[in-house]
């Protein structure tokens, strides 16, 4: 069960990877930091500034949770937009070789991560995430043999809502259509009058938003934030994206859940210290043998 | 037999570039220095060796009994501590040189290079007496005998990594190599034969068996005298690596790598065995990390998975990229920047923070930032040759181009659009 | 005279798309053979099948009596066939001389150890490569650009450089894919002379070309492809007056300029790229 919860989080983060890849054919290596930014922003805002560290209930809880998710999402969106503007756009202007983008992404990721590590920000250790939602309180004590806490329930519900919203957005709105058009053929879209710059920023913003939501949920679920909290989940989310079909939005969901399940099973069968090895092996194997993933590479449904 | 002349100067003299004319009377800055340097030919290696051998004496003059009591002219990095920094920097230079073959010459982005380094070190540990009595060993040979095996294991690993991944595109290859590093590291962490995260202590130091002497310099490879590590192991290794790379550049192999970088499809159509060449790049690159791993194991006498975090793979890549892709001096410079410089800064600051930056970890943030800056403003790195910078700053026709709104449609696109238009017009006329 | 190249019932299928259907023809040693047809007829696909970029779905290609179907492009080069590309694919940041030397390297045997240790063979081969390359650049009329980057050459000179590079692999048969495209009449004359020189020097030529004057004036024999099938073959005069050929051209735009939508080619811009759709 815990594996599936993580799977939903991977799916949310994977959305960002998959959308940016679909449009720019580029792996946004720095997406892990964008994910972390959501949780860290809420840590600062709700934890240190507003001091909401004790559990709340009822309508207040609903308000706080919604606000936290929104703010985390927006913080990440902002970070993503800044990343696009400052790091990627100059390269696009210059029509740079693809190698450059990846190296820049790596640089940006490490820059942000280790800035977060500085003492004037998070420092090296784990910092407690504001505990506004009681981590112990459970929805049911026994669902298929496991205990489902409120937070776990929240993760599942939020993820599903987000995925439905994004699916609608991509398939039914005009902006969504533009994003899909760019992912199919960027030249033709440009010749058709699509404002490429604006659509690219939107892609980053939307992908970043969901990663930020995941960041907040992550903080709530595990109770802490760390400066490099994005690194491993980021890689696993990327694995999920590739597994489901990079560039494919529904694939991100499928990939995330599949990976969560596989991790959980391997944890049970061969021991949890091999979890990461299994995840990375999945990544390597998928990339080598079936890079198009389970559901193929097309973005729309 | 005709004297082997320098092709570049021959071409420049006999076939001046029509596209680049230097106006009369203009002298390019630094030209006489560069030409003088080139003119020495193989003497350059000698000069380099002498400089490298002189450095430890400068850092720690006391090593020569005659210079007892003389202070080092180099600030901050002095004495025994300074030599330790030198040895570590030397190991990183070897790593950077190897990676520069993979990334710089063949153009294959490798984010997990340190995995080979780790394999080299662990191979050494497994083949020499080390660890506790129950530590796993394949054999227990003297340390020097482990060197060829460390290199062999790394080369085989390079080939093993290369073969399945060689048809992957650049970004995917990068992620696979990253995955490879983590798989290797975590496996070493989890298995009992590698002693898990506790690592393998007590690795033997090399014993050449001959009394080595260099002007009275202490010849033991003991812990007090890292000088011998530097002088007898690292300097020859670095020089050999540099010679190897230089020779490769100027040969059929080097040209093939360049051709593959420029246009893989065209290269294949001109007889370049692309597959073989890429695997070869991995193998050659891995070989220097084998040597580096062996040296490190013998020097540190203790290795554990924590010595080889993923971070180091990224750092060594940063070193090569920032220093300059496709340039030997770039790789060396990059390695010095990434290892040596932060040590200097840390000493200079006396362990305190500078503007709130912890020099230990802040350096990584700075290198990340530098990577971005370098990619935007000086693609290819600091010392990259001009051609590489051009290569990296513009996407070639062979890659998928990431379009920019302000760019004009290309000639092909216009022709295509025109042909559709013509077609439509003709249909109307029917 | 035994055929040098024999294309035997070659069919190329990309998923649902039949790019080539049962193509048969032979090329004899020492001739200039022209391959023409409207846009999208499958000419470049055929080149790709011969040079190992694609493996034909059916059929076989023989060279000097030996089957070469399905071999890799670099193996094809060592067998003695080399090609140029419809859209010029030079090594843009290498000089003209270096471009040609890469071609000459195909015939060299210096191994990696020879390279690292600077064996005498390497020295010999490097000098030989340089001389061969300069000679070939001269042969193609672009010797004075030897030290210029490939990307800086004019369009016509880039085409010549591609030809020089292909010739450096010492092929018995060279495949030229629309070498005259984009050239002005003066350049086209020069190209015609160059192709004749190549043949007179002992290399057989298979030529795709759109410009009727060029291809008819040069070729000893001609084959016409339309929608992936050979609709005519023979002497230029015969083919030119063949009603089926005339109809094929008029139906989708005569005269060899940009024509109708691609039907015989796989649906990508780059005729070399492996198809992303369909099976491979």
Image: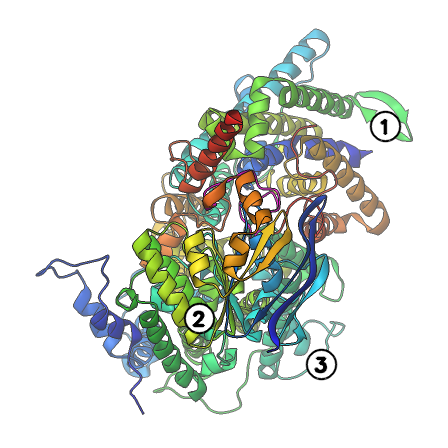
List x then y, in percent, for residue A265: 83, 44
Q: Which residues are magenta?
A: C256-273
The Cα–Cα distance between marks 2 and 1, rounded to whole angstroms, is: 74 Å
Chain letter, disc 2 residue: C
Q: What residue appears at the point 41 percent right and 36 percent down from the top-left corner? A: B409
Q: What residue appears at the point 16 percent right and 60 percent down from the top-left corner? A: B28
Q: Is residue B139 above or below residue C233?
A: below
Q: Identify the disc placed on residue A147.
A: 1
Q: Is residue B120 above or below residue C44?
A: below
Residue with the mark numbered 3:
B139
Q: Secondary structure at mark 1?
A: strand
Chain letter, disc 1 residue: A
* Front in this rendered view, residue B7 or A3: B7
* Front in this rendered view, residue C164 or A45: C164
What secondary structure prevails in the magenta region?
A: loop
What is the quadrant of residue C268 in the picture?
top right
């Amino acid at each position: 069960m815990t594996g599936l919860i993580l799977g939903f989080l991977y799916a949310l983060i994977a959305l960002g990877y998959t959308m940016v890849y679909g449009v720019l054919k580029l792996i946004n290596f720095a997406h892990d930091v964008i994910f972390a930014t959501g949780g860290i922003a809420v840590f600062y805002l709700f934890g240190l500034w507003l001091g909401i560290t004790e559990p709340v209930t009822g309508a207040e809880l609903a308000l706080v949770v919604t606000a936290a998710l929104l703010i985390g999402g927006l913080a990440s969106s902002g970070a993503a937009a800044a990343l696009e503007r400052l790091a990627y756009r100059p390269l696009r202007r210059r029509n740079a070789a693809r190698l450059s983008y990846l190296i820049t992404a790596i640089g940006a990721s490490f820059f942000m991560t280790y800035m977060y590590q500085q003492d004037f920000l998070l420092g090296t250790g784990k910092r407690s995430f504001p505990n506004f939602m009681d981590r112990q309180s459970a929805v049911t004590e026994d669902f298929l043999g496991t205990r489902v806490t409120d937070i776990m329930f929240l993760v599942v519900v939020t993820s599903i809502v987000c995925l439905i919203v994004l699916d609608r957005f991509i398939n039914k709105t005009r902006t969504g259509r533009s994003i899909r058009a760019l992912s199919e053929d960027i030249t033709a879209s440009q010749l058709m009058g699509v404002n490429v710059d604006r659509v690219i920023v939107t892609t980053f913003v939307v992908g970043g938003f969901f990663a930020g939501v995941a960041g907040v949920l992550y903080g709530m679920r595990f109770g802490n934030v760390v400066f490099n909290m994005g690194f491993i989940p980021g890689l696993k989310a990327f694995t999920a994206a590739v597994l489901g079909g990079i560039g494919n939005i529904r694939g991100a969901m499928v990939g995330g859940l599949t990976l969560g399940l596989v991790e959980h099973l391997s944890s049970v069968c061969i021991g949890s210290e091999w979890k990461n090895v299994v995840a990375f092996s999945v990544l390597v194997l998928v990339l080598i043998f079936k890079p198009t993933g389970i559901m193929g590479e097309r973005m729309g449904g | 037999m005709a004297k082997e002349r320098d092709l570049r100067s021959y071409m420049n003299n006999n076939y001046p570039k029509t596209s680049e004319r230097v106006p009369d009377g203009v002298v390019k800055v630094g030209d006489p220095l560069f030409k003088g340097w080139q003119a020495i030919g193989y003497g350059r290696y000698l000069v380099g060796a002498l400089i490298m051998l002189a450095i430890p004496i400068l850092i720690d003059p006391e090593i020569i009994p005659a210079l007892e009591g003389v202070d080092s002219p180099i600030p901050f990095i002095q004495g025994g501590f300074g030599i330790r920094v030198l040895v570590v920097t030397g190991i990183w230079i070897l790593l950077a040189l190897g990676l520069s073959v993979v990334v710089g010459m063949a153009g294959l982005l490798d984010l997990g290079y340190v995995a080979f380094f780790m394999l080299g070190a662990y191979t050494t540990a497994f083949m020499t007496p080390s660890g506790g009595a129950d530590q796993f060993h394949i054999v227990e040979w003297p340390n020097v005998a482990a060197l060829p095996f460390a290199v062999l294991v790394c080369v085989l690993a390079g080939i093993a990594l290369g073969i399945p991944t060689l048809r992957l595109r650049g970004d995917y290859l990068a992620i696979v190599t990253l995955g490879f590093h983590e798989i290797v590291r975590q496996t070493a962490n989890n298995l009992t034969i590698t002693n898990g995260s506790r690592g393998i202590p007590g690795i033997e130091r090399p014993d050449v068996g001959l009394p080595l002497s260099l002007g009275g310099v202490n010849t033991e490879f003991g812990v007090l005298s890292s000088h011998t590590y530097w002088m007898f192991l690292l300097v020859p290794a670095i020089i050999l690596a540099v010679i190897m790379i230089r020779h490769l550049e100027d040969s059929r192999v080097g040209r093939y790598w360049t051709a593959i970088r420029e246009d893989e499809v065209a290269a294949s159509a001109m007889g370049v065995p692309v597959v073989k060449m890429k695997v070869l790049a991995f193998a050659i690159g891995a070989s220097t990390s084998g040597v580096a791993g062996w040296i490190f194991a013998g020097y540190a006498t203790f290795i554990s998975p924590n010595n080889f975090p993923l971070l180091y793979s990224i750092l060594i890549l940063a070193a090569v990229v920032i220093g300059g892709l496709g340039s030997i001096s770039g790789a060396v410079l990059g390695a010095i920047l990434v290892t040596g410089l932060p040590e200097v800064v840390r000493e200079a600051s006396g362990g305190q923070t500078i503007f709130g930056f912890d020099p230990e970890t802040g350096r990584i943030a700075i290198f990340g930032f530098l990577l971005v800056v370098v990619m935007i403003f000086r693609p290819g790195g600091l010392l990259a040759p001009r051609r590489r910078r051009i290569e990296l700053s513009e996407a070639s026709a062979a890659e998928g181009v990431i379009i920019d709104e302000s760019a004009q449609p290309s000639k092909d696109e216009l022709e295509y659009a025109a042909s559709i238009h013509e077609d439509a017009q003709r249909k109307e006329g029917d | 005279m035994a055929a040098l190249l024999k294309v035997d019932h070659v069919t190329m299928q990309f998923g649902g798309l039949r790019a080539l259907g049962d193509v048969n023809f032979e090329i004899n040693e020492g001739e200039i053979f022209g391959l023409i047809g409207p846009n999208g007829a499958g000419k470049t696909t055929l080149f790709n099948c011969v040079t190992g970029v694609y493996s034909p779905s059916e059929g076989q290609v023989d060279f000097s009596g030996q089957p070469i179907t399905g071999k890799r492009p670099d193996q094809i080069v060592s067998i003695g066939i080399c090609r140029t590309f419809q859209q010029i694919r030079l090594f843009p940041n290498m000089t003209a001389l270096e471009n040609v030397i890469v071609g000459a390297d195909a015939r060299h045997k210096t191994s990696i150890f020879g390279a690292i240790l600077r064996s005498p063979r390497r020295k010999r081969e490097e000098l030989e490569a340089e001389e061969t390359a300069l000679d070939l650049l001269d042969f193609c009329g672009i010797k004075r650009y030897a030290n210029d980057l490939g990307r800086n050459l004019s369009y016509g000179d880039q085409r010549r450089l591609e030809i020089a590079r292909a010739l450096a692999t010492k092929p018995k048969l060279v495949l030229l894919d629309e070498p005259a495209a984009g050239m002005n009449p003066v350049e086209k004359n020069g190209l015609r002379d160059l192709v004749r020189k190549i043949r007179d020097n002992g290399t057989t030529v298979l030529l795709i070309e759109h410009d009727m004057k060029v291809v008819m004036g040069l070729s000893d024999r001609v084959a016409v492809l339309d929608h992936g099938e050979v609709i005519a073959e023979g002497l230029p005069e015969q083919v030119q007056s063949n009603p089926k050929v005339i109809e094929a051209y008029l139906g989708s735009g005569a005269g060899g300029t940009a024509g109708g939508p691609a039907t015989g080619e796989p649906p990508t811009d780059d005729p070399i790229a492996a198809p992303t759709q369909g099976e491979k």
